[in-house]
Amino acid sequence: MITVHLHGPFRSFHNGPLRVVAATAAEAIECVTNQLKGFQPGPDGMKRLRVAGHDTLESLYAPLNGDEELHILPLLWLNEKDGRITQIIVGVTLIAIGLAMGGTFWPALLINIGASMVIGGVMALFVPVPRPTKEDEERTRYLGAPPNTVGTSVRIAIGYGEDLFQGHFVSSDTDAAELV
C-alpha cells in the first residue's frame, strides 16, 4: 500500500492521506486521479504537479517498495491563478533589481520589463478566461464559406491582352449552420 499525501491547493480534494495499491508512482497518481473528483486533468489534458523525490519521468515509472509515502505538490506553489501571481512577483522583483542597479540602459530596461509584467499580471487577474459556448462549437463543426481573397477597398487590376486571371471570393455575414 502506498500512502499519498496531497499538499497546497490539492488538499481541498481530500482530507488526510490516501492509501492506494500501486507498483509505481505513476500508477499511484493515476489511482488518485480516478478516485478524486476534480483532480482530473484540465482541458489541455495535463495536471501541473510534481512528486517529491521523483524529478524525472523515468523515476515515476520506477518500481516502489511495498510501503512508501508519496507527496504530491503543485508544480509551482504560487501558481494558483495560472501563473498570474507569479508574473506579478517576477515583475516586482525586476523593478527592484532595476532600481538597485546603477547606470541608465539596463536598469531602465529591467524597470520597463518588470512594470509591463506587473500590469499584465494584474490585468490577467481581472479578465475572465474565455470558455467556448455551444454556439461556438456548432460553428466550428462545418466548413465555412470560402475566405475573402481581397480586403475592403483594395484595387482589382483590370486584365487585358493574353493574361490569365480569375475572380475573387467575397463572402460576408455567412453562418456555416445556415449553409447546411
Image (spheres, rainbow, N blue to C red):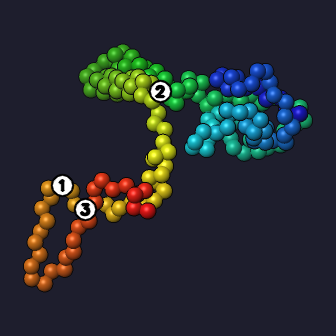
Which residue is most to the bottom? 162
> In which quadrant of the rendered view does residue 32 lie?
top right
Residue shown at 48% from the left, 52% from the top: 138
User: Is residue 65 shown left or right of residue 121?
Assistant: right
Kindly indicate whether the residue at mark 2 contacts the one at mark 1 (C-beta within 8 angstroms). Answer: no
Q: CA distance from mark 1 to mark 2?
A: 39 Å
Which residue: 46% across, 21% down? 89
Q: Which residue is mark 2?
A: 84
Give the residue pinned by disc 3: 170
User: Helix or strand or loop: what does disc 3 sit on?
Assistant: loop
Nearest to N terminus: mark 1 or mark 3? 1
Quadrant position of residue 26: top right
Question: For the residue carrying disc 2, how many other residues have a C-alpha within 10 Å: few (<14), some (14-19), or many (20+)?
Answer: many
Q: Which residue is mark 1?
A: 152
Residue type highlighted by circle 3: Val
The answer, for residue 117, to whether it is visible in the render is: no
The front one of 70 and 121 is 121
Q: Amino acid at mark 2?
A: Arg
Looking at the image, residue 40 lies above or below residue 86: below
Marks 1/3: CA–CA distance: 10 Å
Q: Residues within 10 Å of mark 3 (few under 14, many from 20)?
A: few
Image position, residue 110 (x, y; %): 34, 25
Q: Amino acid at mark 1?
A: Thr
